[in-house]
Amino acid sequence: MSYVLITDSPSDLPWSYYQEHNVPFIPFLVNFGEESYFDDGTTGAKAFFARLAAGEVATTSQITQSRFAECFEPYLKEGKDILYVGLTQGLSGTYESACLARDELLQTYPDRRIELPEAACVSLGLGLLVDALRKRRDEGASLDDLVEFTTKNAPRVNHRFTVDDLMFLHRGGRVSRTSAIVGSLLGIKPMLHVSPEGKLLNHGKVRGRKQSLLLVAAESVALAEPDVAHTVMISHGDCEEDALFVLEEMKKSMNIEREIIHPLGCTIGAHTGGGTIAIFAFGKERTE
């Protein structure tokens, strides 16, 4: 191909996927105190979430302009254009870093193209979009075709989340400490989605874990297009049984042709914690 499709580690696809389908990814940096490492799949999900459960606090560092340049430039030297589809700018400044790298590199490679369409997606929502783009790339679609597909269809990637530990939302500034403590004592589970601008929003709450799983499944089904064979992706915070449960609930009333269930990567998991369930599928355009 005359171009390369690139994403970043918050797309949360299985690490084998990137290698098998020739999709390079740029990893975020994850920090436990003074210890830092790249979110490149070498740290297993169980080990990561065990550290969070033990009380360790993980933070993340966005991809810098220089790291984008290091990733992009070898392809430009080969005479290839670039399509980078990464984590929404609604949750990270990484997109701005990619833009700065693009502007700098195009001064050296003025005949090349670096396309950075904003997808406003996160986790396997981004992974779902990357998978759709990869399929079209493999079928011979042009770079312009993929940019147009992203612009038209990224708003149709629906995200529905629920988390098990409200303290992670408190650390991220989503709820107050008092609300997190009281909600935890009462077994309150928030229902979350990603807005058209790529921001994580709380749109409701239920009491009890099972009710939150049933509701996140029902909401996902309601947003899906009827009579369409869907690809559904579910990411989880080391709770695969719950992911399988919501999948089976969705299958009762939704035509699911293909599914990918995979643990949250360290980048997203650091901000949502263990017990998170997130469901992604194409459907109705996202709203606030």
Image (spheres, rainbow, N blue to C red):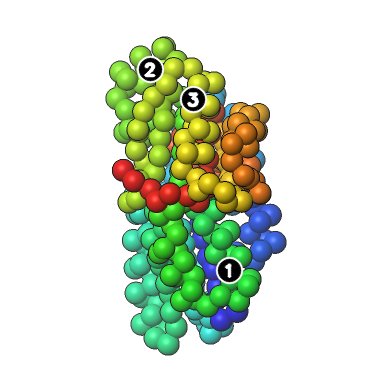
Q: Is residue 250 left or right of residue 220?
A: right
From the viewer's perspective, is residue 199 above or below residue 215?
A: below
| Residue 31 x, y percent position in the rendering | 48, 42
Q: Which x, y percent locates residue 275?
A: 54, 28
Q: Where is residue 49 shown, x and y percent of the image?
A: 57, 32
Q: What residue is at 43 percent from the left and 49 percent from the top?
A: 284
Q: Residues within 10 Å of mark 1 (few under 14, many from 20)?
A: some
Residue 9, above or below 21: above
Q: Position of residue 198 (x, y in %)?
A: 36, 49
Residue drawn 35% across the image and 33% down it: 202
Q: Earlier in the sequence, mark 2 or mark 1?
A: 1
Closer to the camera, 269 or 278? Answer: 278
Gap between marks 2 and 1 measured at Cα: 44 Å
Question: Which label number is shown at residue 90?
Answer: none
Mark 2 or 1: the one toward you: 1
Residue highlighted by disc 3: 212
What is the C-alpha distance between the residues marked 3 and 1? 35 Å
Which is more toward the observer, 240 or 55? 240
In the figure, is residue 151 to the left or right of 178?
A: right
Q: Look at the image and tell me whether residue 176 can be seen.
A: yes
At horizontal 40% and vertical 35% (from top left) the residue drawn is 192
Disc 3 marks a residue whose amino acid type is Ser
Question: Alpha-carbon distance for marks 2 and 3?
Answer: 13 Å
**Mark 1 lies on residue:** 136
Disc 2 marks which residue? Answer: 183
From what the image shows, is residue 278 above or below residue 66? above
Q: Residues within 10 Å of mark 2 (few under 14, many from 20)?
A: some
- Helix, strand or loop for disc 1: helix
